[in-house]
Amino acid sequence: MNSRIQNIFAQCKKEKRACFVAYLCAGDPNFESSIEACRSLINSGIDILELGVPFSDPLADGQTNQLAAQRALESGMTSEKVFQLVEEIRSFSSIPIVFYTYYNLVFSMGSETYAERAKKAGVDALLTLDLPPEEAEEHLNSCEAQNIETVFIVAPTTPEERLVKICEATTGFIYYVSREGVTGEQADLSQGIQSRVDLIKRYTDLPVVVGFGVSSSDHVRSIAQVADGVVVGSAIVNCIAENLGNQKAIESALKDKMGSLLEANSLKR
C-alpha cells in the first residue's frame, strides 16, 4: 500500500504541478495557536505539513525559525506535547506530516521509542537535520520497523559520491537545500538549482523538493518548474511573528500569504 507521502506526490505529478510543503514550528507561539495556524495552512490547500520540533540549539535555522523555536519552548512545548499536537491535527486532517528535527531529540528518547511514538501520533516521515546517513543505521532500522519514511538533506556542497549514500538512506523524498547556510527569507534564489536537481535524480527515483530561502511567489514559480516539490518556511513563520497576540491577524496573514504562494505553485508544467 502506498504511503500518504507517495500518494500526494503521485497526485501532484498527475496534476502537473509541484508538491507544496509548508513549514511551521510546532507550538509557536503556543499549543492552541499553533493548532489553528496548522489548520489555516491545511485549509489553504498545502500538500505536506512540515513541523519543526522546537529545540534549544537549532544549528540549521536562521533567526526567524530560531525565535519560533524559542517562543514554543517558552510556552512549555516538549517532545511529548509535539506528538500531542500531531494527534490534534489528526482529529481533523489526514495530510502527510513530516517532522523537521535534530538527532539529540531522537537520541535522548531512543530511536526505537521515538519512532514508535511518532507513528502512534500520526507522523509520516522524519527529517533529522544533523544525522548523516553513514551513522543512521539505528535510526533507519527504527523508522523501517514503524513504517515511517525518512528524509535526508542534500546541500549545494554535497559531493556527487555522497549522493549515493544519501539516496540509499532516504525512503520519503530528498530535500535539496538551495543554498549554503541556514534557513531564512532571501531576496534571490541561488543559481544552479535545476542542474543540482537533475544530478540528484541520476541516483534516485524518489521526489526531490527544494527549500531554504524560498520566500516569494516568484521563487515558488521558478522551483515548481524544475523540482517535484517546494518548501516554504520562514516566510510563513513570519506571519506568526509579526502578529503575536492576535490570533485573527495571524490567520488572516497566513491566508493572504498562502493564497499568493499556492497560486504561483499551481502553474502547470
Image (spheres, rainbow, N blue to C red):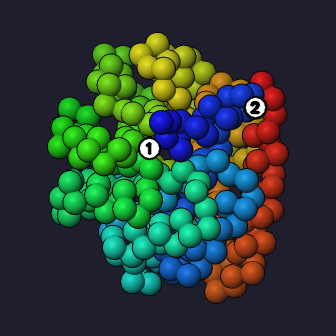
Q: Position of residue 21 (x, y in %)?
A: 60, 47
247 lies above or below 160: below
Front in this rendered view, residue 88 or 29: 88
Q: In this view of the protein, which residue sits in the foreground, 165 or 214?
A: 165
Residue 269 placement: quadrant = top right
Check disc 1 and report its element: helix, strand or loop.
loop
What's the distance in space between the residues labelled 2 and 1, CA to CA?
Answer: 33 Å
Depicted 180 relative to depicted 116: above or below = above
Relative to 118, 3 lies left or right: right
Find numbered disc 2 in the image and state the secondary structure of the residue it sits on: loop
Q: Quadrant of residue 168?
A: top left
Residue drawn where x is 22% and y is 41% of the image:
141
The reply, left or right, for residue 13 in relation to residue 213 is right
Q: In the rendering, at what x and y percent does residue 146 appear? A: 31, 48
**Number of numbered discs on residues:** 2
Q: Which residue is mark 1?
A: 181
Q: Nearer the viewer, residue 239 or 84?
A: 84
Residue furthest out toward the front:
1
In the drawing, what numbered circle is on residue 15? 2
Where is residue 77 shown, x and y percent of the image? 39, 78
Residue located at (54% from left, 17% from top): 198
Q: Earlier in the sequence, mark 2 or mark 1?
A: 2
Question: How busy is the neighbourhood of tag 2: few (under 14 within 10 Å), some, or many (20 plus)?
Answer: some
* Type of amino acid at the residue the image marks with label 1: Gly
Residue 191 seen: no
Label at residue 79: none
Decide: marks 2, 1 in contact (CB < 8 A)?
no
